[in-house]
Image (cartoon, rainbow, N blue to C red):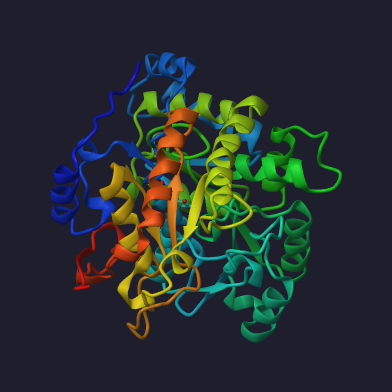
Amino acid sequence: MVERVRMTSREERERAIRDAGYNTFLLRSRDVYIDLLTDSGTSAMSDEQWAGMMRGDEAYAGSTNFYHLEDAMRRVYGYRYLVPTHQGRGAEHIISKILIRPGDIIPGNMYFTTTKLHQELAGGKFLDVIIDEAHDPASTHPFKGNVDLDKLESAIRKYGAKKIPYVSMAVSVNMAGGQPISLENLRAVRSLTKAHGIRVILDATRVAENAYFIKRREPGQQKRTIAEIVGEICSLTDGCTMSAKKDCLVNVGGFLALNEEEIYEQASNLCVVYEGLHTYGGLAGRDMEALAIGIGESVEEDHIRARVGQVEYLGKKLAGWGIPIVLPIGGHAVFIDARKVLPRLPQKHFPAQALSAAIYLDSGVRTMERGAVSAGRNRETGKPIWPRLELVRLTLPRRVYTQAHMDVVAESVLAVHESRDQILGLKMVYEPRFLRFFQAKFQPLDS
Ligand code: PLI
């Protein structure tokens, strides 16, 4: 099957982005030429996955597809128990409700929007313990997703282990630019937390992409398979939340996986409240089948090399033309450093949001802001958070676009970069209460 793409005129795009309040999330997809908004749910399913869709067992309870999914999860990730959810945030909601008490602290290697919100809604507070290099777009540290063990240790000393229900450990750290963690770092986090009786809950969303970087960069890992490395990452944690819409190559789906029976029992009970029966969790049988097959495909060596290789292709092209991007190039996306592109715009005028809108205007390529708009406000003080990273994310769906599409994207970014002096800052004219980046609206400021 092919998806047709539609080219638009400059006038059409001007109208579309104005109507969308200069927020690319509010554009209609028919007005988008090449869609690099996200890699979430936008990948192309394989022939095997489509065949699996035809074998949906849509029984309300005990669907055969659930058991296939459970087998695949155990085989690749190795956890004991599975709770399917409609997507990643469904799993985040459930685990946060179970493990977090009001006043708890959840250290993690950089925030992710939905993960942090669910931790806060459960009464907890997220504490960033990622290494400093992660906040510096120019640092070429090979594992910029790593936890700073001194920061974690001092958090344990300051708050006490009883106030820390778990460490929230991400792989291919999204907000840092798709940056990996090393096995060595995860092992150290594991032994430190174990000594204090603290759990590690993995956000396994892009674990295969992280494993690929470990295989390429970490001493002694070159001969191992991606599947082996993924298995070891998971084995160093007590459970995971998974947005299956990324690595696992499905359009919808997620899960919570656990090793402790007691937590699993609570989770499967909350699943029936918020998601659906514990053997479908908001998914159709056919979705679970496609996911079971996608899990296997996600750790295939050729697939993952081609996937990360395409991101690298785009990133190298942009970097080669002098466009400031986050280095090293990440696993799922290329991130443009909007502060460097638009140094005359203060952060309060949302340079990344403005740059993202400008790229759409130029060519119909849709990207996403990952800066001050995404960071939102401090929930206690209500004050805006001003992150060091002010980025535009060009996110590549898996198995969808060709290298020629990447050339079109790169040429548009170059054109926008060359005319960057004309880009106006933005003011926010509508701000929703939660996860504002999805629905906020803006207006251009006068030049
Ligand atoms: O969109 P969900 O609810 O399936 O998953 C939430 C989620 C959790 N963790 C991480 C690292 C994510 O990247 C993530 C969703 N990411 C989106 C939608 C993205 O565009 O990156």
* Quadrant of the drawing holding the C terminus: bottom left
Residue 331 visible in the displayed image: yes
Q: Is residue 242 left or right of residue 139?
A: left
Look at 73% across and 76% down and name the residue there.
150
Look at 64% across and 32% down and name the residue there.
305
* Along the viewing direction, whichever of 383 and 446 lies nearer the viewer: 446
* Along the viewing direction, whichever of 233 and 16 lies nearer the viewer: 16
Asked if 10 appears above or below 142 in the picture, the reply is: above
Residue 295 coordinates in the image, percent (x, y): 55, 31
Q: Is residue 187 left or right of residue 53?
A: right
* Quadrant of the drawing holding the N terminus: top left
Residue 166 visible in the displayed image: no
Residue 191 coordinates in the image, percent (x, y): 78, 63
Residue 239 coordinates in the image, percent (x, y): 60, 51
Q: Quadrant of residue 220?
A: top right
Look at 41% across and 71% down and name the residue there.
120
* Along the viewing direction, whichever of 379 and 277 lies nearer the viewer: 379
* Along the viewing direction, whichever of 373 and 290 lies nearer the viewer: 373
Count of numbered circles in the view? 0
Residue 154 coordinates in the image, percent (x, y): 69, 81
Asked if 388 appears above or below 211 in the picture, the reply is: below
Q: Quadrant of residue 173?
A: bottom right
Asked if 255 appears above or below 164 in the picture, the reply is: above
Q: Quadrant of residue 281?
A: top left
Q: Is residue 79 left or right of residue 432?
A: right
